[in-house]
Amino acid sequence: MAVRQNFTDKATGRFHDIGQRWQARRMVKHAASSSIPLHARNGSRNSIHAAPRNGASVGTSSSAAAATAGGGGEEGKQNGHFDVIVCGGGPSGVAAALAAARRGSRTLLVERYGFCGGMATAALVNPFSGHAFHDQLAPVGKRASLIGGIFKEVALALHAGGGFGSVLMDAAFDEELLKRIYDAALVEAGVTVLYHTYLTGVRMSASSGIGRIAEITTISKGGGGAFSADVFVDCSGDGDLAAMAGCPFSVGRAGDGLTQAMTVSFRMANVDKRAMLAAGGMRPARALVEPYFQRALASGELHYPHRNFVHFYDYPRPGVLHFNMTRINRVSGLSAEDLTRAEIEGRRQAFVFGEWLMRNVPWFRNAFIDKVACQVGVRETRHIDGLYTMTMDDIVEARKFPDGITRSRYFIDIHNPTGALDPHQRPNGKGEVRSGFGPPPGDFYEVPYRCLVNAHCANLLVACRALSASHEAAAAVRVMATMHGVGEAAGIAASEAVRRACGVADVSGEWLRSQIPYMSEAPDYGAPWNVEEIFEQKETKVTEMKHEESLTSHSPLCASV
């Protein structure tokens, strides 16, 4: 059952019914079959700008999308010109493509998987982080978001579908529903999407002594492709496009170049969550399992040096928990060999820990490993050199900037490249953050536009975790709600650079900030952050039914493990 919530949009003053609005967006087939984008036909508040000039839409295959892009060229090769090309369909890439297309730019989004979401979907990273102005234990009515815009649209759509927020974790989300929401939004905005397509190279040109990307080359099942654009946005996560364009960068932390540890996330289903739901918060829920874990480690029953405390999150579906418990150290996201080792080792750790839970912890007696991420979660690789490099001081001193384009109070979350104990952890605090690793209470920092702009390439923005930041600052700004904000700003800037026929550095950061309404507003205490959830009643009913069934007809699964 979807929760429907009415709200008034602060930017326009218009009243919306979220359930009805996103029900309309489900009609993808009408958008895909028409040369007129949905937002140009339905009078949505997102259609304040002209429709894309080529009437682009999501391609149902590589060939269809290439035809939408302009087609042409030799057999098996895709060619086309766009105003804006976005490489990478993670949260920042989706937001960048939407923002550019909604401002009238002919926009191409290139993504290697068959869906968008990046770490949020392929790597099962959950929950959303970076937006919260409150702590994890804040009750309904005391929760607030620092980030609005496209991120808020996504959160509202997830909530309308029953896939956002839970009793224990207000920003947990259903990644399968997220894929669908991203698809629908891209179709509605008229973005041309190429799934199953890999970036392979760039062709550069020079203008006034500074480089420009003339076109990118790609490979897909349909063969090679070459696409040109006026502006490019690197949302690859790793700064792949920027590196191919020759932009200077660093990797990992200063000194040894090691990057944050990787994680293979996984979920367990059929968990008896009643005691956890009654615990009153995520940390108290984890504390129920923690003694079992520590006793097993101390006795030698469980060899698990990868984490020093139990780390799981609630999930917005009955009986399901999300686990961030695996850790692979000393690996590089820029090495196929290291990524292969990380995938194999991460899956091994997931099953070791999951099977131990099923054998030894009562709430997991009938549980099972429901899903393991199809990609290892990568937290850090390249840091592209930008016009400004964010530092640890920018985070802990809550610095604001005239060209600030999004904001957050997320802490410096460094997953130790070499071990289990993270620098930010308070000793014996089970993940609690030490003083000096985040902004002061009640304050936040901003991300400046200059972190997205570099001096090497005039028509490139880097709008992903590879933006210009130190190892420490990147550990704070890399998270997914923040990346929605970064991507949205990049899309607006890219469209403006196209309109003015100028370089991205010539787009005023102060002007860009003025185009993002939430940057001048107080934290948002409205929907969906403070909507009373239906999940608690639903969760309790389901777990009671499972308990009754187990008493009458089922023997514990752990007997056969």
Image (cartoon, rainbow, N blue to C red):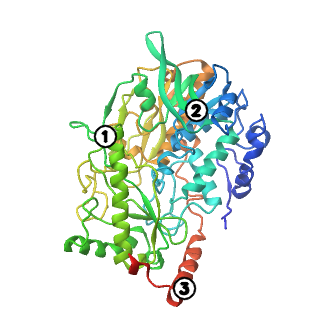
Q: CA distance from mark 3 to mark 2?
A: 54 Å
Q: Please report the residue visible at 71 percent of the width from the left and 36 percent of the height from the top.
A: 48
Residue 462 sits above or below residue 164 on the image: above
The reply to whether residue 439 is visible in this rendering is: no
Alpha-carbon neighbours of circle 1 within 10 Å: few (<14), some, or many (≥20)?
Answer: many
Q: Quadrant of the C terminus?
A: bottom left
- Residue with the mark numbered 3: 549
* Label 3 Cα neighbours within 10 Å, binned few <14 / some 14-19 / many ≥20: few
Q: Amino acid at mark 1?
A: His
Tell me what residue is drawn at x 76 percent, y 37 percent: 40
**Outermost residue toward the top in this view:** 208
Q: Nearer the viewer, mark 3 or mark 2?
A: 3
Asked which quadrant contains residue 111, the reply is top right
Q: Which residue is mark 1?
A: 471
What residue would you read off at disc 2?
Answer: 492
Q: Is residue 55 left or right of residue 359?
A: right
Tell me, yes or no, if residue 74 can be seen here: yes
